[in-house]
Amino acid sequence: MKFTWGVLLTSFSAVYSLYAPEQEFLDPEAGKYGQNNLPYEIVTHPSFNNHRIRIVQPKLCDPDVKQYSGYLDISQSKHLFFWFFESRKNPQDAPFLLWLSGGPACSSFAAMLMELGPCNVVDEGHNVSYNPFSWTESANVPFLDQPVNVGYSYDDHYGSTVNTSSVGAQDVYAFFQLFFHRFPEYSIQPFHVAGESYGGVHAPHIASVMHKHNKQLASAPKLKHINLASLILVNGLTNPRIQYPSIRNYACGDGPYPVLDPSDDDCAALQTPTGICVQLTQQCYEKPSRYTCEPASVYCEATVLAPIFTVGMNPYDVRKSCDPSVNPQRSYSAVNWNLNREMSATGEGMANTASLVPELINDGVRLLVYAGDADGLVTNYIGKECWVEALENQFHGEFLAAKSLPWVDSVTGRVAGEVRSAGGDGLTAGNVTFVRVYEAGHLVPHDQPEAALDLITRWTKNIPLSNT
């Protein structure tokens, strides 16, 4: 993903001037000053000797809310960048929602500045404007660049790069233990983990690690219980064996927007590669390793996904045509492509991350899966609904029997999509819920910001998404 930043980057210097790999680490009593004499606070935790947080209080984007930003330092060589915004309304009672972008290796600050953050980039990157539909309207939201070397996160030597979500999840857990150690007032609120795109791989791993640690707290009394309430997967890749075949289904007639002519040779040509892709992915599921999963990834992307990029439409939003004219001098890549290749080479993206989800659901963690219906990628809404249908959990039968109902935006009164839900007897937003968002592509909060805010507000407050 590329977008213009222009001089906007200079306005962030007050935050990322903490990036000082050549600087000696400071003892809390020794001054706590970074580059440009920027004062910061150091947070440590007795159970995490190899981790600490450096924190500043910026006033960018939304100066009227409390903000914290800085780095989680890991073993004095790896550094994860974060930026936290308190809710605009009743922060003491607002839910806590972690946002993770995908890629792999895409900065979460692309979403902060283009989708759901308190400000949006405007004027070709020269300014920001107040976002009235920020998710901070109803939630306390930290944005996190992870794993190391994504976005503003960095590694002093690069050789210690984390290239799997399962390992990176341990650092994320450590971060929140330190964060809640310093700010215990946020630890009591319901905690929601939201992941977009490849975040459909990251988020289940992180939620699973948090859940497992919560179960072990009796043996670790110094740690805080993370009040894990739900897992939110936004146009995410989670079960590729089911999702890859949906590319052909979506493009060849089942989707709401014409991508390929169902009677054309292009649709017929996708049939055999799709079958082989499923076979290779099944081998990855049965014997997960780089040697089974990476070949599946290479084959499926080259033969099933790549053809969608050749039809002249924007696969991220098939309502639009592709614009090839991007000036490289005015663009910023939100993705670390070297790390993207390293993570892709592990084959992790072809593993069945959905297998982590049933334990969460059965232990009371709610699941929301939603997708824009103009996304033509492997993350399209057809494949996502299919993998939720296949997910074995205590609400499986109820979800299979559930009908899709209209989701009406509670503010505008507009039908914003369709919702299908199990659990809650219609009195809540459900325990397993799928939402198709109308007229939105891969980046739902960007395309339908008002509807996305309505969805996330009702979900985190556990208010029914359908009035029927």
Image (cartoon, rainbow, N blue to C red):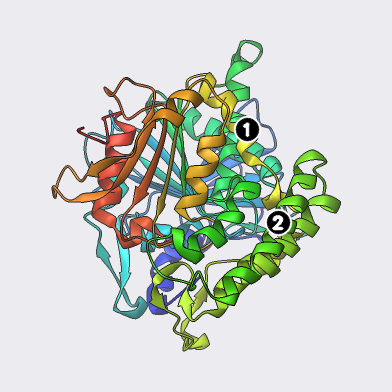
Q: Quadrant of residue 266?
A: bottom right
Mark whose residue sits in front, 2 or 1 = 2
Rendered location of residue 285, percent (x, y): 75, 42
Rendered location of residue 325, percent (x, y): 46, 89
Amino acid type for the residue under numbered disc 1: Leu
411 vs 281, nearest the viewer: 281
Image side of residue 100 versus residue 124, left or right: right
Image side of residue 252 versus residue 299, left or right: left
Q: Is residue 154 visible?
A: yes
Rendered location of residue 12, percent (x, y): 42, 65
Helix, strand or loop under label 1? helix
290 vs 202, nearest the viewer: 290
Helix, strand or loop under label 2? helix
Amino acid type for the residue under numbered disc 2: Gly
Q: Tag on residue 275?
A: 2
Q: CA distance from mark 2 to mark 1?
A: 25 Å
Residue in view at x 37 percent, y 48 percent? 436
Residue that carries the numbered disc 1 in the rendered image: 356
Farthest residue to the right: give it.
291
